[in-house]
Each structure stands twice: as C-alpha cells, then as structure tokens.
Amino acid sequence: MLVAGYAIDHGAELFASRHRGMANHGVTVDAFIDVDQLAERLRRAAKGAGQSWPLISAPLEAAQGNVARGQAVVALFYRLMWAFGDPRPVVYFDPRTADRQSAVSLRAKCVVIDHEYTLITSANLTDRGQTRNLDAGAALEDRGVAASLERQWLKLVDAGVVVRA
C-alpha cells in the first residue's frame, strides 16, 4: 500500500486497520508525508492527549538540519500516531518540507492498494477533511494507473527528492 498525505489527524484511529493488515496479512505500507504539517498535527495530538509538547518534542527542537528534523518528526509520528509497534510503515519525506521557511510542501493525497486500486483526492486525512469539507476525488481500479502512480513516487525516492526516515 502506498499512502501520501498532507495533513493527518486521529492517526491512532486511522491507522489501526492498516496495522492489523500489516500484522495479519503481510501488507506493506509506504507513507509519504509533509514534515512541517505532520509536526503541527503531532503537536495538536500531544496537547489533546494531555502530554507536554515541549517535553516530548525536545529531540525535534534539537535536530540539526532538514533530514534530522524530518527523522525526529517521524519518530514522534511512531510514538503518537502509530503506537501499535511493529510492523510499521516505511515513511518518506521531502527534506525541504522540514524547513519552516520553505515554500515547498507535499500536498498530494493519494492511496494505492494492491498495485491495482487508486484513490486520488483533494481531501486531507483529517477529521475535517473526511467529514466536513467539500472535496473531490477519483477511485480507480486500474493496474496501469496504480503502477504509474507508484513509479512516480519511487522516482522521487531514486532521485533523492524524498528520503526514507
């Protein structure tokens, strides 16, 4: 499974079924995220859970450079939104999205399942994006489209535009 998303909230609820699929059926998940947006969502999740963001985000604040900052955000993602343990998704990010001053963002919202089913949408993986916003998307059952989209992301990895956390 490939998932790309700009904004994510309620991760523990959203990803529970993905974890079960990974644990019980050998499903693999590659996730592509926007670092700065995910950091903001993690801050909100910590606050909502009554956790001290300054305390748990210390490694993030201490991170030097965009790659280290991205890796720190992914570590917090595993802690706050993927608290299930192993298996875990492989998370990729564009280091430029870790720079708070950068105009670059990973805005894509798409899912590819079983190299066949594709969802491309304007909806974020947030409560608001799924329940209140008026968004549009297309769900396709086409191996060619799925393969093309997967290749697009893998080319970004191969070119070093996005890196593995």
Image (spheres, rainbow, N blue to C red):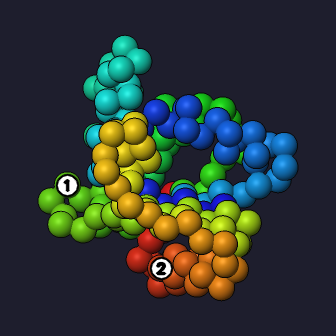
- Specify the label residue 41 is tagged with: none
SS at mark 2?
A: helix
SS at mark 1?
A: loop
Residue occupying image coordinates x 43% and y 57%: 5
- Asked if residue 21 is positioned above or below residue 162 in the image, the reply reads above
Image coordinates for residue 140, horizontal then vertical, percent: 60, 71
- Badge 2 amino acid: Leu
- Asked if residue 60 is positioned above or below residue 142 in the image, the reply reads above
| Res. 147 in view | no
Where residue 107 sits, quadrant-wise, is bottom left
Q: Residues within 10 Å of mark 2 (few under 14, many from 20)?
A: some
Q: Which residue is mark 1?
A: 100
- Badge 1 amino acid: Arg
Residue occupying image coordinates x 76% and y 48%: 22
Residue occupying image coordinates x 35% and y 64%: 106
Q: Which residue extends farthest top?
A: 50
Image coordinates for residue 15, horizontal then vertical, percent: 59, 40
Instruction: Name the foreground residue: 101 vs 34.
Output: 34
- Give the mark toward the camera: 2 or 1: 2
Answer left or right for 113 relative to 49. right
Q: Which quarter of the rendered picture does the N terminus lie within?
A: bottom right
- Asked if residue 25 is positioned above or below residue 76 in the image, the reply reads below
**Alpha carbons under labels 2 and 1: distance apart:** 21 Å
CB under 8 Å between discs 2 and 1: no
Q: Residues within 10 Å of mark 1 (few under 14, many from 20)?
A: few
Image coordinates for residue 83, horizontal then vertical, percent: 59, 31
Instruction: Name the foreground residue: 137 vs 115.
Output: 137
Residue occupying image coordinates x 64% and y 35%: 16
Q: Which residue is mark 2?
A: 156
